[in-house]
Image (cartoon, rainbow, N blue to C red):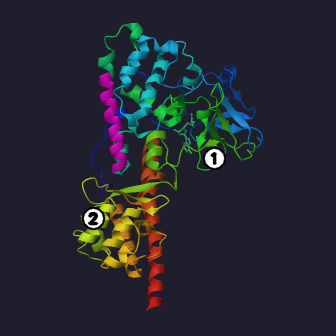
Amino acid sequence: MSTKIMFMASSLSQVRPLTCAAAGGLSSGRLVPQPPDLIKWVKREGGFVHQAVKVAQQLDGLGLIATAEIPKGSDLIVLPEHIPLRFEASEADSEKGSYSSLIKLAQHIPEELWAMKLGLKLLQERAKKGSFWWSYISNLPETYSVPIFFQGEDIKNLQYAPLLSQVNKRCRFLLDFDKAVKIKIENLRSEDHPFGGQDVDASALGWAMSAVSSRAFRLHGNKRPDGSHINVPMMLPLIDMCNHSFNPNAEIVQEQDTANGRMLVKAPGIQIKRDDLLLLNYGNLNNDLFLLDYGFVIPSNPYDCVELKYDSALLDAAGMAAGISSPNFSSPLPWQQQILSQLNLRGEDAQLKISLGGSELVDGRLLAALRVILSNDKEAVQKHDLTTLKSLSAEAPLGISNEVAALRTIIALCVIALGHFPTKLMEDESLLKQSVSASTALAIQFRIQKKALIIDAMRNLTRRVKSLSSKESVTF
Ligand SMILES: C[S@@+](CC[C@H](N)C(=O)[O-])C[C@H]1O[C@@H](n2cnc3c(N)ncnc32)[C@H](O)[C@@H]1O
């Protein structure tokens, strides 16, 4: 089962940082105690900031707030093209040895850790005396609440293997990359040194990666020869002070056709009232990504899900627990095997990750597989296409008793999944009431949300079973 804790991630908080503090809590502290005024800097650089937009304390950190009503469609912040921080250097900079050393380091970074690539540029600017972006960088948080900085015990406290493996992967990468960076830069001439002669360690690299993953936006970069745009991550000073909501009142617009390619934050069709927070939608992400990249968890997140593995032994156990034993769980009939292959649940390239939660509630492939495995009527199954078999809103396509058996098996899978968490939801809730550290609380909140999601799915499926069973008894 994927909810079992399989290994411990090596947390970066165990690495003694030389250049930045590892997160001890959810601090709103900035890199320097009294950083320059970001709004003034943006305006001085030719940007626009609506006069009612101000930076204010919010959610253990900072955010943007409206100090007066702002009409629909107003521009809130406009950044000229030279303000966003991107990895690509200006023509003048690209001639420099320090930039080409940065490119060489970036070649060690896997594509999925793109935040580290831009993070190298951020570290370079952070180390550079008189950097153009100093007003921005000095306003960045000093620490991040992402799990790569958790103590080992709090990583264990997450209790969820798919996230543990991601955290572990990032920690391992940072520790290895730290070594690679040290070797690459130790003998460089000072003018070629990417960080102005300063040492960086895994903790500084982790700081930079987290700064980027929690604040960068992927927007259109330079044009390709065919006129299309390359999507590039960039840090958008001040705009990145907006916190997240799934019901945002602001949106980012990128002007592509103007000569200067400005970035805008607009109040789209919504009138902003005085004291409203200015909120952007960071994306319809699950809590794993919110925690990994941004260091927070959204309660009752409609996009959250629990990952399980499609496994015949697990289905057997679930079937048994639900009082539905079928030899077909472990040995599906040849025509059932064919459908399982079409569902990509059998065969060499099978994708066995399935999920509960999110808008679908039950992974369509799991639902279809159970409906098919629990049916002995090949003709009846073949009357339906896969889309119908995968859909929970297609009510009982193979008959009520088949549907009840499939849903009860999924409910039993939920019970098994819950049983793999070392603690119960109620224990977690009472632990949260005690005085625990900020990162312990975050880890507990994360696992509470996973458990609550499974319990909600069980409730929903139980309601469906009850309603179907009552229809069945009316039919007879
Ligand atoms: C783009 S920054 C926003 C500005 C940030 N609050 C600051 O103090 O600089 C993203 C970070 O803000 C915080 N944040 C944003 N939206 C949040 C939310 N809905 N709940 C909790 N924290 C949030 C998280 O720490 C996240 O990593």
Ligand 1 falls in quadrant:
top right
Residue for point 44% across, 73% down: 462
Which amino acid type is shown beneath numbered disc 2?
A: Leu
Q: Is residue 340 magenta?
A: no
The answer to which of 30 and 264 lies nearer the viewer is 264
- Asked if residue 162 lies in the magenta stretch, the reply is yes
- Relative to 347, residue 274 above or below: above
Q: Is residue 439 left or right of residue 328?
A: right
Query: To which quarter of the image does residue 70 belong?
Result: top right
- Disc 1 residue type (three-letter): Pro
Q: Residue at x 25, y 65 (%)?
A: 312
Q: Is residue 72 above or below residue 306?
A: above
Extreme front residue here? 226
Expressed as whole percent of the image width and height from the top left, the position of residue 171 reads 34, 35
Residue bearing mark 2 = 314
Q: Quadrant of residue 249?
A: top right
Q: Nearer the viewer, residue 458 or 385?
A: 385
Residue at the location (33% across, 72% down)?
Answer: 372
* Secondary structure at numbered mark 1: loop
Q: Residues within 10 Å of mark 2 (few under 14, many from 20)?
A: some
Image x and y of residue 204, in percent? 41, 25
* The image quarter in which residue 244 lies: top right
The answer, for residue 271, to whether it is visible in the render is yes
User: Residue 373: where, in percent of width, then height?
Assistant: 30, 72
Work out how far the residue at label 2 is from the one at label 1, CA to CA, in angstroms.
41 Å
- Identify the magenta region: 161-180
Quadrant assignment for the C terminus: bottom left
**Tag shown at residue 248:** 1
Q: Is residue 61 left or right of residue 373?
A: right
